[in-house]
Image: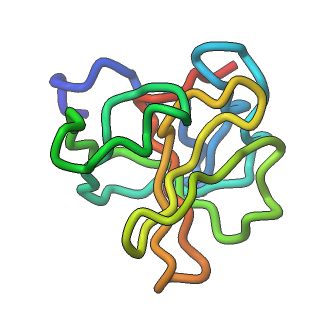
């Protein structure tokens, strides 16, 4: 296990590679995913810094960005308990909490119909 990550993933990932705990919004605690609904995936994605949905529509160039590599990969949008989507930003929709609209907590490319990525560092687990 690489020591540079702030989240210890050993207790988050089950033996079959799925999330062993519920995935929750960091801000309001709303359940985003139930246990066993997503697979751990490493993919380098660049997401805008966390903010409310109304602030995400700012011009792309003025938004601070974070590079994140640890994600929960969800295969079907109906596997989520609670998630919202921003308007299209190019070919991307960002995932946000449907209750408090904080985000982005994840990413979905419109060209990929089955890949929804939720950044592990942008959610809580319980």
Could you tell me residue 15's position as x and y percent? 58, 49
Position of 112 compared to 2: left or right?
right
- Above-or-below relation of 55 to 28: below
Identify the image quadrant of the C terminus. top right
Could you tell me residue 125's position as x and y percent? 62, 23
Residue at left offset 72%, top offset 16%: 29
- Above-or-below relation of 48 to 45: above
Position of 81 compared to 33: left or right?
right
Residue at left offset 67%, top offset 34%: 97
Could you tell me residue 57's position as x and y percent? 43, 45
Position of 18 compared to 120: left or right?
right
Q: How does the figure colour the protein chain or chains?
A: rainbow
- Above-or-below relation of 40 to 96: below
Q: Nearer the viewer, residue 52 or 81?
A: 52
Residue at left offset 27%, top offset 43%: 68
**Marker count (numbered):** 0
Identify the image quadrant of the N terminus. top left
- Above-or-below relation of 55 to 35: above
Could you tell me residue 116's position as x and y percent? 56, 63
Q: Nearer the viewer, residue 67 or 58?
A: 58
Instruction: Write down the quadrant of residue 82 in the picture.
Output: top right
């Amino acid at each position: 296990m690489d020591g540079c990550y702030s989240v210890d993933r050993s207790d988050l990932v089950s033996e079959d590679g799925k999330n062993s705990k519920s995935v929750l919004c960091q801000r309001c605690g709303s359940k985003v995913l139930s246990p066993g609904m997503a697979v751990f995936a490493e993919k380098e994605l660049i997401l805008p810094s966390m903010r409310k949905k109304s602030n995400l529509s700012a011009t792309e160039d003025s938004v601070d960005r974070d590079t994140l590599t640890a994600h929960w990969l969800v295969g079907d949008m109906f596997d989520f308990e609670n998630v919202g989507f921003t308007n299209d930003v190019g070919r991307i929709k960002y995932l946000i909490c449907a209750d408090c609209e904080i985000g982005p907590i994840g990413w979905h490319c419109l060209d990929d119909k089955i890949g929804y990525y939720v950044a592990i560092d942008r959610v809580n687990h319980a």
